[in-house]
Amino acid sequence: MSCGPSGYRTHSERYPLDLFSYTREVAHCRDERRFLAVITLASTAVELIINRDRRTRRITLKRIAGWATLNNFNLRAAEKHGLPVRTLLEAADDLSSDTPIAFVRLRNKVAHGEIENFISDISDYDPAAEQLANQQESKMRRFVSEWYNTAPDVQDGHIRKHRWED
């Protein structure tokens, strides 16, 4: 699978429909300059993989109502089980720290409505929002692409007809 916006992939039936929907929506929102939505949906695509990948379903993750959220603890655990977490990191990020990595920190700020420190105009017109959205999308696309190209769920055919195996 490529990490570009088209996400070209062989064996498209092995690409889960829910994940396809999120990654497709990211592209549409970016094209429509809905930068806060890009940030949120890109993060959700990563979180979806962490929750649905067979390698992380039965490991100890910090969960809320059964759902593993994006945080350094869960990302470290996912990385130990083969997920391409390094694609989400910036040079200054440290997964062993209590401080969330930039990808998660930005997601949290947007999800909790704390955008006043990095958006100074209507988000659709704010160059800073556009830059942050593009960075978030790029990290997500690299993560999804590397996951698709290496995940046993995909490579061994556990995902069939665009559906995760239960």
Image (spheres, rainbow, N blue to C red):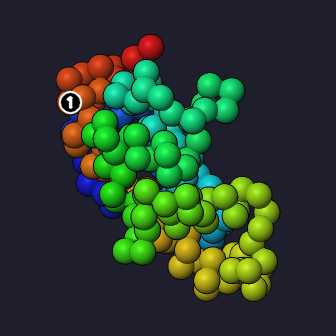
Mark 1, secondary structure of its residue: helix
Q: Please, which residue is most extreme toward the front here?
A: 97
- Residue marked by disc 1: 155
Q: Quadrant of residue 35?
A: bottom right
Residue drawn at x 47%, y 29% as measured from the top left: 60
Give the residue displayed 68% in from the left and 27% down from the top.
65
Q: Amino acid at mark 1?
A: Gln
The picture quadrant where one finds residue 155 is top left
Q: Position of residue 68 (x, y in %)?
A: 56, 35
3 in relation to 114, above or below? above
108 is higher (above) or lower (below) than 31: above
Tell me residue 49's x, y (percent): 44, 38
Question: Residue 30: percent from the left, percent from the top?
Answer: 56, 66
> In percent of the image, x 37 and y 74: which residue is there?
91
6 sits left or right of 18 in the view: left
Q: Is residue 90 visible?
A: yes
